[in-house]
Amino acid sequence: GGAAYEEEGGEDPEAAKAALKAEARALLEGFNPGLHVGDRHFWMIVTAPEVPVAGEECVIMFNRLQSEGLRERPRIQMQFAFNNWDLRNPDGANFSADMVPAPMPRGESDFWWTRIKIPENSFELNFVLTDTNGVFENNAGQDFMYPVAGGITAEKWQELAAEIARKKEEERLAAEAKA
């Protein structure tokens, strides 16, 4: 059963998280975008690591040639949040990061890239790409969604989000009472 497995040195979740984090850091140290893309020149999105890791940086690479709307646009911005778009900036706005052309040969592909930090308390990354002038690449209306490894569960996030909402409401009521 489960207990016997634990006694025989079952994988420690903290050790597994530490290994994921170390792997992500190693991959991004001296990161080579051309090598990482490899034979995926016709992909629209390539990430490093493949599965973003909570608490670590993640490289998002976007191939403009695979996007009808953004193919020729001079500016590309990633607008993103986490946990089904629930985890955003404190002011409620999405996070944003400008993308720049990746230092790799053009031709079959035209990859632009950015680096973002994945929060510890996340279970998924959500994003769309835009030229900031109303043109979006949003995965045919589905938005882009990548699971996050080593973070929290969706259930744990629901508990945290409810607690955060409760505290905000208490603060609002306290402020109202003073007014």
Image (cartoon, helix red, strand yellow):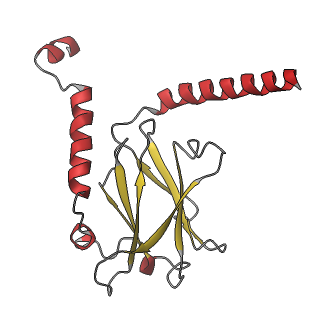
The number of numbered discs placed on residues in the rendered structure image is: 0
Q: Is residue 113 left or right of residue 167?
A: left
Write down the quadrant of residue 163 in the picture. top right
- Image location (x, y in percent) of residue 64: 45, 77
- Image location (x, y in percent) of residue 142: 55, 58
Q: Is residue 7 left or right of residue 25?
A: left
- Image location (x, y in percent) of residue 169: 73, 26
Quarter that holds the C terminus = top right
Q: Is 55 located above or below residue 129 in the figure?
A: above
- Image location (x, y in percent) of residue 123: 44, 39
Write down the quadrant of residue 161 in the picture. top right
Asked if residue 12 shows in the view, the reply is: yes
Q: Is residue 26 left or right of residue 148?
A: left
Q: Nearer the viewer, residue 9 or 3?
A: 9
Write the residue at 51% across / 42% down: 83
Write down the quadrant of residue 53 in the picture. top left
Quarter that holds the N terminus = top left
Write the residue at 86% across / 21% down: 177
Q: Is 150 located above or below residue 63 in the figure?
A: above
Residue furthest bottom as drawn: 107
Q: Is 128 located above or below residue 62 in the figure?
A: above
Asked if residue 143 shows in the view, the reply is: no
Residue furthest right as drawn: 179
Write the residue at 69% across / 28% down: 168
Write the residue at 21% across / 30% down: 15
Residue furthest front as drawn: 178
